Amino acid sequence: MEQLTIFTDGGARGNPGPAAIGVFIKKGEEEIVRIGLKIGETTNNVAEYTSILKAYEYCLENKNTIYGVSQINFFMDSELAVRPLNGIYKMKSPKLRELLFEIKKYEQKLSAIKIYYMHIPRELNKIADSLVNLALDNKL
């Protein structure tokens, strides 16, 4: 069985301000996709969760991505995103709670797969971070 590795990031210039997401997905050592998208005016935290939702959407729309996968490892540089996903911190913002609920619905759709959310230092999330900046700079 294979593992899917997903690096996600979200950012807003001005917070709130123009925002974008970055998603980098690998299956084993094979690169599957890089996604960088503007998502309008919002906050950094909303962008972080939106990047996770986009990763799930991609996986479910492109079933071959998750075929044969027994585990999905999400890596992100936002502890504020990771902690609620792992049930460590309770969400106060209604908008963020709504996004967290949407993420949990995706987890249920993929209940046969083990899913982990892990915090990493920003320097280990360079690809997803660069996708955010490229999208914000209109270079994608």
Image: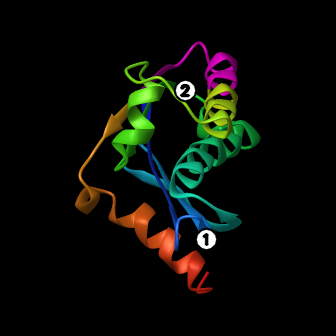
> For this view, does 70 lie left or right of residue 138?
left
Residue most toward the right?
Answer: 61
Please give the range of residues in magenta.
Answer: 104-116
Neighbour tally class for label 2: few under 14, some 14-19, many 20 plus, Cα within 10 Å = some
**What kind of residue is marked 1?**
Gly
Q: Nearer the viewer, residue 102 or 55?
A: 102
Q: How many marks?
A: 2
Residue 134 image point, x, y percent: 52, 79
Residue 45 image point, x, y percent: 52, 50
Q: Nearer the viewer, residue 25 or 68?
A: 25
> For this view, does 67 lie left or right of residue 81?
right
Q: Which residue is mark 1?
A: 17
What SS does tag 1 mark?
Answer: strand
**What kind of residue is marked 2?**
Gly
Could you tell me if the residues under marks 1 and 2 are in contact, i.e. CB atoms within 8 Å? no
In 3D space, how far apart are the residues under numbered discs 1 and 2 (Cα atoms)?
39 Å
The magenta stretch spans residue 101: no
Q: Is 113 drawn above or below residue 60 in the view shown?
A: above
Which picture quadrant has residue 61?
top right
Task: Tell me if residue 35 can be seen.
Answer: no
Q: Nearer the viewer, residue 86 or 114?
A: 86
Residue 87 image point, x, y percent: 43, 18
Q: Which residue is mark 2?
A: 68
Dot 1 or dot 2, earlier in sequence: 1
Question: Which residue sits at x=58%, y=13%?
Answer: 112
> For this view, does 23 lie left or right of residue 57?
left
Task: Tell me if residue 53 can be seen.
Answer: yes
